[in-house]
Image (cartoon, rainbow, N blue to C red):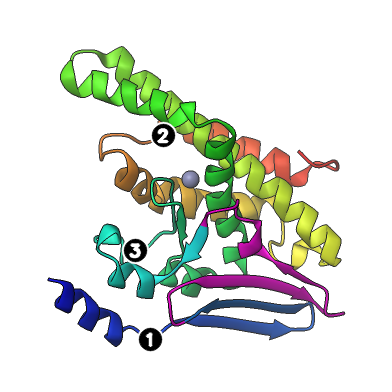
Amino acid sequence: MKESIKSKEEQIPPFQLNIKDEIGSFHIVENNSGSVRIEIINKEGKKIVLSDLLPEGYEAIGNRRIMSDAKFLGLGNVDTSIADIENKVLVVSESEVKNEGRRYFLTFLHELGHIKRHEANPLFKKERDSEYTQWTRHPKDVEAFKRAEALIAQDERDAWAFAIREYRKIIGELGIPKERIFKSANELMEFVRQTSLGLKANEIRKHVVGQFSISEEGKKRLAAEIFRMYSREELP
Ligand SMILES: [Zn+2]
């Protein structure tokens, strides 16, 4: 068993993404031990290391680490990044990085938002899990199901609020015009709708179970709120 995990690890080359243009550069580099560093640098050379924003004890990791450690079994080659609270890691999805390019910066901040929220309020997860347990034991308890869904929607909303606030703060500090990454609030909202509210259902599935998602109504409300958070003058 151990051997098969190790041989898989040896086959996985560390991944990286390097974008360089007139607004600066963006680097995502996985090292040999599977630790991932993400940095954004403006054209004057001012640098912000996004992976350093993780709280003490947390680490951003990629496929190499996942494949070499049995506790991450099943998380490898995920199509979406995941805040794995139990193992204190932010799993950086290589395919998401490749699909999103520089915009992955926002996705990373969203996952970081989940971690920050958990650190600020660890009871939230307990509460959500207990509503879920209540529902699995008493499947007719639709109210418990609804409460769990509402807690998940709230978690998503707060993680996005964190992401957009930090995103605006960071590009402001680096002097990067915001329309250089997302042309408009509409474009950003569309990005969030596709990644978070569509495909990111996986993120929820991996943490809770398949039945849970955000209701259609909740998704619309969240998209509208994201639009407002991104477009208004002052930081949300
Ligand atoms: Zn999320």
Please indicate whether residue 214 sits to the left or right of residue 54 in the image: left
Label 1 sits on residue: 13
Mark 1 or mark 3: which comes first in sequence?
Answer: 1
Q: CA distance from mark 2 to mark 3?
A: 21 Å
Identify which residue is drawn at 28% across, 86% down. 11
Type of amino acid under label 1: Pro
Type of amino acid under label 2: Ile
* Closer to the camera in the image, 152 or 49: 49
Identify which residue is drawn at 40% across, 31% down. 215
**What SS does tag 2 mark?**
loop
Residue 218 appearing in the image: no
Stretch of the chain drawn in magenta: 32-58
Label 2 sits on residue: 214
Q: Which mark is residue 78?
A: 3
Nearer mark to the viewer, of 2 and 3: 3
* Closer to the camera in the image, 223 or 115: 115
Quadrant holding the C terminus: top right
Whole-percent x, y for residue 35 in the image: 48, 71
Q: Is residue 119 magenta?
A: no
**What SS does tag 3 mark?**
loop
Please indicate whether residue 174 sits to the left or right of residue 137 in the image: right
Residue 151 placement: quadrant: top left
**What SS does tag 1 mark?**
loop
Whole-percent x, y for residue 14 in the image: 43, 83
* Closer to the camera in the image, 158 or 117: 117
